Image (cartoon, helix red, strand yellow):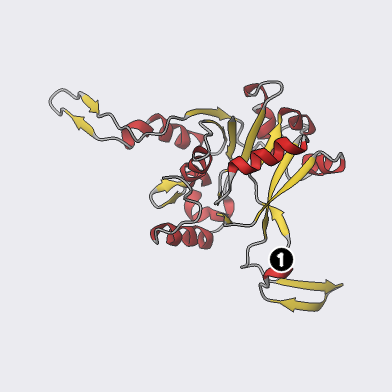
Amino acid sequence: MKAVILAGGFGSRLSEETTLRPKPMVEIGGRPILWHIMNIYGAHGVKEFIIALGYRGEVVKQYFLNFYAINSDISVDLSSGATTVHQNDNQPDWKVHLVDTGLYTQTGGRLKRLKEWLADDETFMFTYGDGVADLDIAALLKFHKAHGKLATVTTVRSPARFGRLVLEGDRVTEFYEKPEASEGWINGGFFVLNRGAIDYIDGDETIWERDPIERLAHDRQLMGFRHYGFWSCMDTLKEKNMLEELWASGKAPWRVWR
């Protein structure tokens, strides 16, 4: 089972952190959020990743090229320049493919560019490089295999920080502040797809969340896996700081790995 992760966007809404690095490399607890996402999958046995690069892709490449050394003890002989990286048995046994999918390619286009990295009948995971959850990946996969459709999207409750109101024209007819019962389901990422779902993508300009998803739904090929637990994206500095606080507390809900 492979997991495809989008890591090529500009992250403009988090510009305080993304001037010199792509958003998936913004750190939570001293580790890129990409590392957190990969560990969520890794906790459920997913060990092969395809990372779709774009903006500042070299930062992601440098991180993984130096991953073993960064996360191990090192001895450096300053007289000769010889370096010894000491064995670290706690390193993850992942295989990571880092693929340039273009600087301005949209989300659907990035996925389409990765089609040749997947076998003809392959089922794979697919998500964004900025969201974490205490998601049961095994249950998600079981759900996908049971319904036999091309695509499954993990649906999550709209975060409580968003209040709700009802409009008639420009007039507000109802206003309620963050009541759980009134919150709807939204796209939480963490898809499971059959390779055939990629055929719904036209090209580089295609936004995955628009035409492809709409067509899959119209063709009755899209199912929703309800996740009732923790989920958060990292679109803004406020959200980034919230995730930092949770991690620092030692009670980060998405830490489903040891």
| Residue at the spot 43% in from the left edge and 62% down from the top edge | 245
At x 39%, y 58%, the residue is 250
Residue 177 as seen in the image, left or right of residue 234: right
Q: Is residue 115 left or right of residue 137?
A: right
In this figure, which residue is indicated by the disc labeled 1?
183
- The x and y percentages for residue 183 are 71, 66
Question: What x and y, as percent, mark residue 209?
Answer: 73, 45
Give the image location of residue 53, x and y in percent: 56, 34
Q: Seen in the image, is 19 located left or right of residue 193?
A: left
Q: Is 22 located above or below residue 17 in the figure?
A: above
* Residue 115: quarter of image: top right
Q: Residues within 10 Å of mark 1 (few under 14, many from 20)?
A: some
* Above or below 109: residue 250: below
Pick the quarter of the image with the N terminus. Answer: top right
Where is residue 28 drawn, in percent x and y? 44, 52
The residue closer to the viewer here, 182 or 13, is 182
Q: Nearer the viewer, residue 104 or 66?
A: 66
Would residue 207 be visible to someone looking at this image? no
Residue 192 in sight: yes
| Count of marks placed on residues | 1
Tag 1 secondary structure: loop
Quarter assignment of residue 105: top right
Q: Amino acid at mark 1?
A: Glu
Up/down of 245 relative to 142, above or below: below
- Residue drawn at point x = 71 percent, y = 69 percent: 181
229 or 213, which lies in front? 229
Please state if 201 lies on the left or on the right of 6 as rendered. right
Question: Which part of the image, by quadrant, shows the C terminus?
Answer: top left
Q: Quadrant of residue 114?
A: top right
- Residue at image coords 66%, 21%: 119
